[in-house]
Image (cartoon, helix red, strand yellow):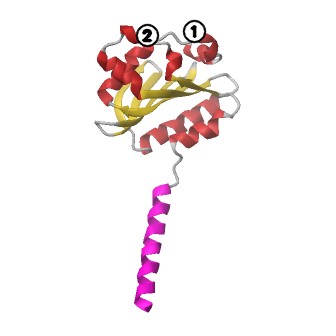
Amino acid sequence: MKRRNNLWTGAFLALFLAVMSACGDGQSLQQYYVDSAEKEGFISLDIPSSMLNISNADLTEEQKEAYRSVKKLNVLALPVTTENREVFETEKAKVNAILAEGGFQELFRMSDKNRRAVLKYLGDDKSIDEVVFFGADPDRGFALVRILGKGMNPEKMMEFVKLIEKSDIDEGQLGDLKKLLGE
């Protein structure tokens, strides 16, 4: 009987340690969004894919499939000002750390002068759980976009990025985000 109790105690302890180590000290991207959305200076938008106003008639079959797999885009932006430059640098470093440690795989990276952008994803080669775009410009600020959906495919997500360029988003809904994008 005593051996059985020790076995259960050992199993429970192992399970507890496994759960605690999985939690880790690092902040998840989702938690960063939640924590930052209400902070002063941040712009937060949830854009359902239906708001992109993409006409299905103009799409290839791959583009239609990519469009159907996306449910929404979460946008978090921090425009830079003379008053918040230090906050901007701190927050940019936080996002970079989360993306470096969060198990994301890189699709591509771009840089132009001081501007930097990266497109990463969570999941595997057949099914993506989340696509993340992070772009930063020291004169304008940064934008962090999470593309959430179901059954997203890495190859088809490149088609979706092309679709966003064709989209006709209602600019009234973008508000202050237009300033960051330079429009």
Between tags 1 and 2, which lies in front?
A: 2
How many circles with numbers are drawn on the protein? 2
| CA separation in Å, label 1 and label 2 | 24 Å
Across and down, in percent, residue 153 comes to: 32, 30
Q: Residue at x 45, y 57 (%)?
A: 22
Q: Residue 113: x, y in percent? A: 44, 18
Quadrant into which the N terminus falls: bottom left
Badge 2: residue crowd in 10 Å (few <14, some 14–19, many ≥20): few
Location of residue 153 with respect to 4 vertically, above or below: above
Find out whether residue 11 is within the magenta segment: yes
Mostly what secondary structure, the magenta segment? helix
Which of the pair 96/9 is nearer the observer?
Answer: 9
126 up-or-down from 50: above or below: below
Relative to 13, residue 80 above or below: above
- Magenta-drawn segment: 1-23
Q: Which residue, given by chain and number where applicable, does mark 2 sit on?
A: 55
Considering the numbered disc 1 on the image, is that residue within a helix, a strand or a loop?
A: loop
